[in-house]
Image (tube, helix red, strand yellow):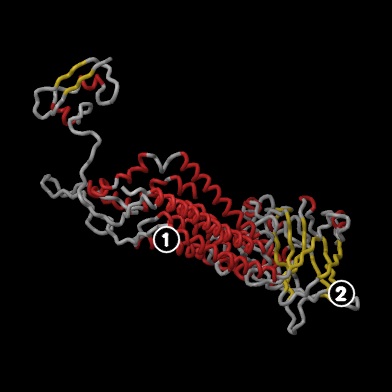
Amino acid sequence: MAVNENADRPKAVRLRGKDVNAESSLKWPELYRSGQRQELSSPLILISSLLYAVYSSLVFFFIPFGVFHNTAYDFQTMAVTVAMAATFTANVEISLVTRYWTRLNVAAVCVSVVMFFICSRITHSTSLFKASPGDYFFLGASNRAFIDPLVWLTALLTTWTAVLPSMTALAINVIFNMHDKHKVHSASSQPVELRSRLRRGASLRRSSYALSQGAGPGRLISSGTCIRSTVPTVDEQVTADNNPTDSQLQINMKNK
Amino acid sequence: MMASSYNAKEEDANHPGAANHAGAGVVKSKKPDNTAFKQQRLPAWQPILTAGTVLPAFFVIGLIFIPIGIGLYVTSNNIKEFEIDYTGANIDNPCYDCAKNFSWNSTAQCVCAVTFTLEQPFESNVFMYYGLSNFYQNHRRYVKSRDDSQLNGDRSALMRPSKECEPYRTGEGSPIAPCGAIANSLFNDTLQLYHIDSNGTLNEIPLVKKGIAWWTDKHVKFRNPGGNNNLTVAFQGTSKPVNWKKPVFELDPEDPENNGFINEDFIVWMRTAALPTFRKLYRIIQKKPSTTPTLPSGKYVLNVTYNYPVLSFDGRKRMILSTISWMGGKNPFLGIAYITVGSICFFLGVVLLIIHHKYDNRNNSADIPN
């Protein structure tokens, strides 16, 4: 379950975050950084997700194992304990990732936890057992488990231990990245001018608009002007057309 | 959720209306509705995550867990428990002869007496358990080897047990009741407890055998076929499980409320344990009405009718006497685990605080105003 959750990080981030409008996208280009650097699906992220999944599986088993070892508790009570811990852990993980808490997000988390308890009570009920004894044989397990303090204490301990690495990662993230973080709440949407490294009239690069106004891109393409920035290969001199829209277009290439 | 609802809206917009034959009709706009939900303008709370809000969480949780752990550990230490192994694996164990001479065919019962001393008196209700080790009641194939319809008193399932009970489904030509491996391996040792007082006389301690099973098990899940009377007639046409010495309607002939499928020892055994080392409630020693302790300190004798062989799979059998509290029996693990996790959390909080402090200082000193 943990691997499944963490494997689709981009989807997870998308579903819990908020879309950004066009002006804000231009204003904060650092939002693209995670995609360009493949921060969300790099091998390091995948391996750490896998390790975290292994760690949480071990926690989900061994802490209830230590509690219920050499006791009179049966396997159905242990199953309910582990299920409670897993539900709480999943909801806590989701809460740690959510940044925009609308009423729907709050409702989703609350309904998830409440539905777990309701569905457990339903599937452990007498009426379903009488309808199909072979399938609903957990009769009475949640009756005793949900009022047993030992079960709750074990579930809470397991939840917190399983969530500890995520909390630590969040804390480290906050410590190291707090300075670079803009206050994203203040959205002043002013139109932003695109600034490019290339000045107008730079002789080595031409925009596609400029190309379309000229004689044709043939010479430019075969000379590799747009690709290579330093070493020219062709000894050619291409002079600009007498087109007033082009400004200072002289391409001098010399092969030394 | 928001993304999928956006897509649904798009698909709707792609289908042109059926009434637009002429082509001059209104084309549905593909733009999503201008509601707060669809335009993601819902009021939202954004948590301000700074070191000042995240780091205290570690300290708070640490400070909550450590006292809980200490409380649990102290409570667990106050619970009195006594455990004695009576498997007979070594020659110095009183039950060694019974264990060595066990055979499936013998009709004579082997009885061994184990003496022990209680250092402290046990107050209030004392619970007597039998414990088994290296017995995997949680094995998948074993757990499924039962027929809950048959145990619920269903007559058709009584005569035609489920396939899950194989190979303990039919025996001697007739269906086995109760079928399955769990029922077949029913624990059948008998334990009796005697107190040796100062005169040297043996006083039998009264053991209560009712009230040891779950209420839902005894009254809903397990039902005798055709009521609790005339069980011999009700179970006609079935045979007893292979390893049992008596058939199911002779488990407790004196008490019709405890005979057949609703026998409480049987029900307790059928509730499979979670781990290979487990204990199951055997009897309850009720507290005395006066202020005398339920089990005074002193010498005791445990008489064991040794019927259950465990040495073949290197198992062990024990008898446990225990008082209980709000957290069940003695469980030091939970207290220690809470203290450990609380301390780790607190320590992590301190380490993160140091890192934050160093990083903050380095950043502040490195800033050169332009």
Q: Would residue B140 be found to the left or right of residue B288 on screen?
A: left
The residue to which callout 1 is attached is: A109
- Do we see residue B355 in this rendering? yes
Residues packed near mark 1 inside 10 Å, few (<14), some (14 to 19) or many (20 plus): some
Numbered mark located on residue A65 in the image: none
Q: Are marks 2 and 1 on the same chain?
A: no
Q: Would residue B98 be found to the left or right of residue A151 on screen?
A: right
Which element carries disc 1, helix, strand or loop?
A: helix
Report in which chain the residue with disc 2 lies: B
Residue B361's spot in the image, x, y percent? Answer: 44, 53
Above or below for B185 versus A194: below
Which residue appears at 58% of the width and 62% of the height? A154
Residue B27's spot in the image, x, y percent? Answer: 16, 48
Which residue appears at 86% of the width and 74% of the height? B196
Residues packed near mark 2 inside 10 Å, few (<14), some (14 to 19) or many (20 plus): some
Q: Would residue B153 be found to the left or right of residue A28 on screen?
A: right
- Do we see residue B240 in this rendering? no
Most distant residue in the bottom direction? B290
Which element carries disc 2, helix, strand or loop?
A: strand
The residue to which callout 2 is attached is: B196
Residue A238's spot in the image, x, y percent? Answer: 17, 19
Residue B343's spot in the image, x, y percent? Answer: 58, 60
Q: Would residue A118 be found to the left or right of residue A253 on screen?
A: right
Q: Nearer the viewer, residue A64 or B175?
A: A64
Report in which chain the residue with disc 1 lies: A
Q: Amino acid at mark 2?
A: Ile
**Image quadrant in which the N terminus of chain B is located:** bottom left
